[in-house]
Amino acid sequence: MTNSSQEFVQHIAKRAEDFPKWYTDVILKTDMVDYSDVRGCMVIKPYGYGVWELIQAEMDRRFKETGHENAYFPLFIPESLLIKEAEHVEGFAPEVAWVTHGGNEKLTERLAIRPTSETVIGSMYAKWIQSYRDLPVLMNQWCNVVRWEKSTRPFLRTSEFLWQEGHTAHATFEEAQEETMRMLDVYKEFAENVLAIPVITGRKSEKEKFAGAYATYTMEAMMQDGKALQLGTSHNMADNFAKGYDIQYLSKEGKLEYCNTTSWGSSTRMIGGLIMVHGDDRGLVLPPKVAPIQAVILPVAQHKPGVLEKAQELFKELQADCIRVKIDSSDQSPGWKFNQWEMKGVPLRIEIGPRDIEKDQVVVVRRDTLEKQSLPMAGLNRAIKDMLNDIQRGLYEKAYKLRESRTVDAHNFEELNEGVQNGFVRAMWCKETECELAIKEKTGGATTRCIPFEQKELGTICAHCGKKAKAMTYFAKAY
């Protein structure tokens, strides 16, 4: 690396020294986001939005394959509608932003800017659903929501963010539960195969569940600093919301029954997770499936005859084979370009110069391993695709190994407390909220992340209070 490039990389903090600053440096230096003039809000710049567009496309395809349709519902929710489900509104009350005036006139009723859409969608389902023939209703919405957060960080927690929220209605509790689990599985498959992030799925505690839900299920990922990040949740509402919003249907037997509903959501928070799971001290490391640019072509000695022409020819061939590719023919120095595209996390860098043209080859550098190799022009498309697939697999495996190396079993509170300062802890728990709150206070912020579906027998008593244990649970500090 040249002196100038070393100086360039120094603009990013070291992960081991200051992980939060490293994260902020990376998202700003790589043009993912910028801060807006509104407190707690971010501007998602084209490179960051390009990642979101690919996430949207991959998830939307999966939603439609499972029978869901997209719709759009209003941003504003009348206060009288919001308060119909008491537990729900109580859970969101501190985060709700209110509109009190329209122009110069005070509104007769306050309007909430949606923190989530169960209420407004529930009121519409009450109009649309009359008979068992109308069920199930399977809808998803891509939109923005507003939650007046006290502490914010781009992508991870902002006052306004982008997300998708699925809302479905079913005849029975069992059908709603099946839907809740199906969508959690969709999230898990997406996280692992597209984002290359290993996740743990399970049920949230009563304290941590979604306000108004019968049960909340989650997928939890470990960041490189050992903290957890909730990447998506799926909620079985049973008939709680149906009763609040009068969502009823006439059964085959001619009886009026309440529907059972679900909701499930994931957001731009996944981009924050992507950065914190895969990034390194050089900047971003993007999994190929969500990289806006999968390969960047850098013409070397581009002023010499035939170099730019050959780079353009290569560009067209790769693009025609559905590889997202870009040429950097700017007048910046090669060292600057190398560092710039490494920092932006582009999976592959393809260098081509006069000597490469003579040998009918290119030089390819992998972002994940920084391995450099020469590849013949013949069959290059196939070789590039194979390398992209290998990078995708390798990033998942690396993240999985890190998570496993920082996950420990605890049999008492001393082991639990020590473990959550470094990563995930599996421990037996009594499932009592009082115990849960005490653990959080004594550990400096560790919470129950989920009660996993795959249980491991670690004893018969709670690791904290010593009462009879009811489930093995994951504990961690979290974003």
Image (cartoon, rainbow, N blue to C red):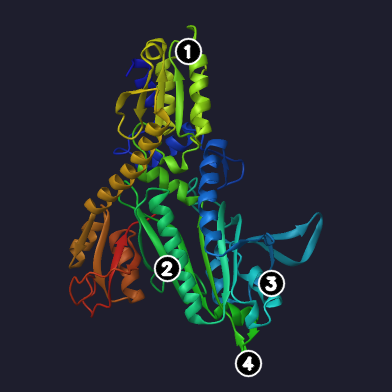
Amino acid residing under circle 3: Met
Query: From mark 2 to mark 3, how far is it between C-alphas?
Result: 25 Å
Specify whether 194 is left or right of 166. left
Q: In the drawing, does residue 30 fall left or right of residue 200?
A: right
Q: Do the residues labelled 4 and 3 touch (CB within 8 Å)?
A: no
Most extreme residue toward the top is 304
In the foreground, 319 or 80: 319
Query: Where residue 54 sits in the image (x, y, percent)?
Result: 52, 45
Outermost residue, front side: 378
Q: Which of 458 and 312 is in front in this view?
A: 312
Q: Is residue 202 visible?
A: yes
Query: Is residue 375 placed above or below 57 in the rendered structure?
Result: above
Q: Where is residue 265 in the image (x, y as percent from the top left)?
A: 51, 61
Q: In which quarter of the image is residue 385?
A: top left
Q: Distance between the residues labelled 1 and 2?
A: 54 Å
Question: SS at mark 1?
Answer: helix
Residue ID for mark 4: 255
Asked if one can make out residue 247 in the rendered structure from this viewpoint, the answer is no
Query: Dot 1, crowdedness within 10 Å: few (<14), some or many (≥20)?
Result: many
Q: What x and y, as percent, mark residue 239?
A: 55, 81
Residue to which mark 1 is pinned:
307
C-alpha separation, residue under disc 1 versus residue under disc 4: 76 Å
Where disc 2 sits, the SS reads strand
Label 2: few (<14), some (14–19) or many (≥20) C-alpha neighbours in 10 Å: many
Mark 1–mark 2 contact, CB under 8 Å? no
Q: Secondary structure under badge 4?
A: loop
Q: Name the residue that disc number 3 marks.
A: 124
Q: How far apart are marks 4 and 3 (CA)?
A: 21 Å
Q: Check residue 217 in the rendering and tell me which mark sits there, or answer none.
A: 2
Q: Which amino acid does label 4 sit on?
A: Lys
Q: Which residue is drawn at 59% across and 76% down?
A: 85
